[in-house]
Amino acid sequence: MTRMRTMASSAVAVVAAAAVLAVAVPASNAYAINKVTCRAGEHFLKVEGHDELGGSFTDCFANAGKYNYYSVWVKKITTGNNDVVFYDVNGSTVSIKRGTVYKPRKAAHVKAIKIK
C-alpha cells in the first residue's frame, strides 16, 4: 500500500510540475509557411523559376516560415504583402521588402525562401 501511495504522489507531482511549466513558459511563435494556390489579386509571396531539368514552376506561399527548395533557379519573386529572404546556394542571403517584384539579372540558384 505504501508503494502505491508513493507512486500516486509521484504522478501527482509530475502532473503539477507540467502544469506549472505550461503556464510559466510563454508560447513561441509557430511558423508554418504554406504553399497556396496562386490567384490574381492576392498578396501572397509568388516565386517563379525552373528546376535542374528545365521544368518551369510557379509557387505561391502564405504565412511566416521557411520553405526549402531542391536545386531550383528563380527568375522572379513577387513579395506581395510579405518581407522575404531568399537563400542562395552560394551562401548569400537577399532580403526583399514587401510590395516588390524582384527579377535578378541572371536566375538565382535558390536553396530556400523565407517569409518573415
Image (cartoon, rainbow, N blue to C red):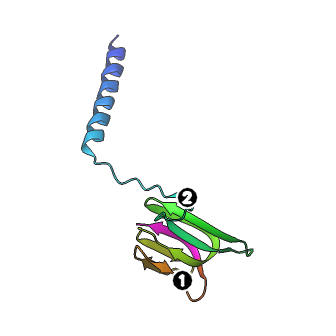
Quadrant holding the C terminus: bottom left
Q: Residue furthest top?
A: 1
Q: Which residue is mark 1?
A: 103
Q: Secondary structure at mark 1?
A: loop
Tell me which amino acid carries mark 2.
Lys
Left or right of residue 26, residue 68 in this image: right
Residue 70 percent location from the top left of the image: 63, 68
Residue 46 percent location from the top left of the image: 53, 69
Q: Residue at x 30, y 40 (%)?
A: 22
Per the picture, the main secondary structure of the magenta-coloured stretch is: strand
Q: Which residues are magenta?
A: 110-116
- Locate residue 50: give its quadrant: bottom right
Q: Secondary structure at mark 2?
A: strand
Residue 95 percent location from the top left of the image: 43, 77
Q: Nearer the viewer, residue 20 or 102?
A: 102
Tell me which amino acid carries mark 1.
Lys
Q: Which residue is mark 2?
A: 35
